[in-house]
Amino acid sequence: MKKQDIIKAILGNRYGKSPVLPSATAFASTNIALCKYWGKRDAELNLPITPSLSISLEQKGTTTEIQVNGLNRITVNGQPIENRSSFGKRLFEYVSLFDPNEPLSFHIQSNIPIGAGLASSASGFASLALALNQLYNWRLTLKELSILARIGSGSACRSLWQGFVEWEAGSNPDGMDSFAKPLPQIWPDLCIGVLMHSHAEKKLSSREAMNRSVKTSPFYSSWPSKVAHDLIQIKQAIQSKDLPLLGQIAESNALAMHALVQSSWPPFSYSLPQTLEAMQKIWSLRQEGLEVYFTQDAGPNLKLIFMEQTLTPLLQVFPHMEVIRPFVGK
Amino acid sequence: MKKQDIIKAILGNRYGKSPVLPSATAFASTNIALCKYWGKRDAELNLPITPSLSISLEQKGTTTEIQVNGLNRITVNGQPIENRSSFGKRLFEYVSLFDPNEPLSFHIQSNIPIGAGLASSASGFASLALALNQLYNWRLTLKELSILARIGSGSACRSLWQGFVEWEAGSNPDGMDSFAKPLPQIWPDLCIGVLMHSHAEKKLSSREAMNRSVKTSPFYSSWPSKVAHDLIQIKQAIQSKDLPLLGQIAESNALAMHALVQSSWPPFSYSLPQTLEAMQKIWSLRQEGLEVYFTQDAGPNLKLIFMEQTLTPLLQVFPHMEVIRPFVGK
C-alpha cells in the first residue's frame, strides 16, 4: 500500500505504537489558493502537477479532537456522522493508515461549511494530522506533517501555517519533496472578504473535476506554464505589497481554472447565478476605480481580495460579506 | 487601402461604375457557428486564424434595401439611424469602398436583435453584399460575394447559403482563399431553439473580445487544434446524422470559446445569470436522458440543438423557446 509506505517512512520506529494520550485536540485554518492546485500527477498520494500558493484564513478553520475511547464515532459540529458515509469512510480510511487497530472517536468543530468550496478538507486533514501527532507523541516537524496532511487531502498540506504558503510540486515519485512552506512576508492591511452564495455541498468534487480537466480539457496542456508565470508574479506582488498585481493574477488564475472545468467534458460550472452577478459587480466596481479582485474555488462562493481602506465602500455593495484579516495581530 | 485592393481585384473593370437600378433588395439568413470563428490573423480583412462551420437559420435574418436617391440615410426596422453612430459609420465606410461618390440610402429590416449575439452583422453584411451585387449588376458568384461579405463582417461570409456552411480559413495574405461554401447534407428533423435572455446590445463586441483572447488568454494557443479536431467530428456527425456527437462537439466548442473569453484579461463573461441557469437546466435534462445540447455566441442567449422528437418535452421546460427548422421544405 503506497500511502502506508510513505507513512512508515516518515514515522520510522514510531509506526504501530499506541496513543500516549487519552485525547488530543488541534486547530488548523482553512486556506484559499491565490494560485490554484488543479491536477494530480499521482492520484493516490495527491501529488500535484504544478506548485500552488495560498493564504490561510486565520480563525476560519477546523478543530479536531481525537479520543481514545474504544469506539469508532464521529461528530461534526455536535452531530453524529455515519461511519459508512463518504465522509466517515474517508476519515477512517485515513486514520487506519497510521494505526489499523485502535478504535478512535473524532469530534470535529468547523466554522466553515463542508464541501462548499471553502477548503473544509484542507483545514480538516491538517487539524487531524496535528491532533494525531499529539495523540501519538510523534514530534514530527511541520514539513513532515505537511506531507501527511497532503496524503489526506492535497491542499491540506498548506493549512499548517498562517499567512502566505507555497506548496512545492516536487518531482519524486514518493512525494517526499512535495510539501508546503510558509513565506516570510506579512501584509497587515490585506483583507479577504467571503461572499457566501451557498452552504450546500458541491455537486462535483474538486477531485473529480480536476481529473476531468486533466483528461478532457483541450486547454489543460497550457495550465502548467500559466501557473509558473502566475507564481512568479504573485511572489513579486507579495514582496512589493502590490495589490493590483496580486489581485489581477489571483483572479486571472481562478478564472483560468474555471475555464478548464467549463471546457472539460462533461462540462460543469461551480458558479451559481449569484456568483456570476457578483463577479460582474466586482468588474464594474473596478471600472469605477475600486481596487477589488476575487478568487473562486471549487464552489459557488467568491473570496474578495482588497485592502483595509477599501472595506467601507465594499460593505455598502456587499453588506453580508464576511471580512477576514489574515495578518491581524502579526 | 487594403480592403479596396481586394474589392478592385474582384470587381475588375466593373469597379467605379454607377448603379444600374434605382433600388435593390436582398435577404440573408443569420447563421450560428457550431464550430466558432474566434481570432483573426488579419484584422483589416477579417481573415480568421481557424476555419469554422455554421448552420443558417432559414427565415431569421436581415433584408436590406438600397435606394439610389441622392441621400445618405439609414433606417433599421423603420427607425432612422444617425450616420455618425458606430453602426452608420461602419455601414457607410463599407459601401464607400465600392463607390465613394454615390449617395445611397439603406432600409434594413431585421427579425433578429442587433448586437445581442445572434449574428445580426452576419446576415446584415451578407444581405448588403447581395443587394449591392444587384444594384450594380456585378453578377458576382456566391464565392466572390462571400469574400466581399467577409470584409464587412467575418461571419457574414457564411450567411450566403442555407444549411451547413463551412468557412475555410485560407492562407493567402490577400484572403482570396478565405471564403465559405455550403455542405451538401440535409438534416430535416434537426431543430434549433433560441432562448432569448436579453435583447440588449452586448457590452463587449465580439471583435474586441476575440482580439483580447488571442492576445491575453493563456489557452489561445490550444484553440486552433481544438477547432481542427472539432471540425472533423462535426462533419462526421452531419454525415451520419449523429445528434449526440454534433451536440457534444458544438457545445464543447462554444464552452471552450467562452473559456477563452473568461481567461482573458480584463476578464469578461457574455453570460447573464439566466444563461447559466439555462445551461445547468440543459445539463440536468441530459442526465435525465433528453438529447439536447446548446451553443452560445458572443451574447447571453443560448441556441439549443435537438431533434424534432424532443421538441414537446423541451417546450415544457422552455415554453418561450423559439423553434427554427433549418431544413424545413428541403
Image (tube, coloured by chain):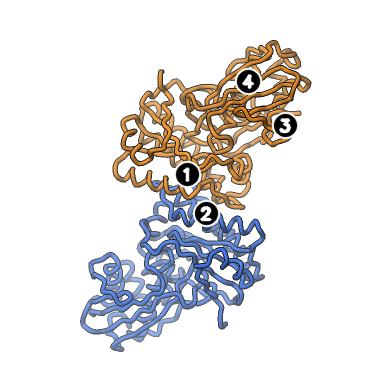
Chain colours: A blue, B orange
Residue indicated by mark 1: B255
Q: Earlier in the sequence, mark 1 or mark 4?
A: 4
* Image quarter hosting the C terminus of chain B: top left
* Image quarter hosting the N terminus of chain B: top right
Q: Residues within 10 Å of mark 2 (few under 14, many from 20)?
A: many
Residue indicated by mark 3: B83
**Left or right: A199 with respect to A280?**
left
Q: Earlier in the sequence, mark 3 or mark 1?
A: 3
Q: Which mark is residue A256?
A: 2
Residue name at image x 62 percent, y 31 percent: B153
Report how far apart the C-alphas of labels 3 and 2 lie in the structure: 41 Å
Pointers 2 and 1 in contact (C-beta within 8 Å)? no
Q: Which mark is residue B138?
A: none
- What SS does tag 2 mark? helix
Residue indicated by mark 4: B65
Report how far apart the C-alphas of labels 1 and 4 lie in the structure: 36 Å
- What SS does tag 3 mark? loop
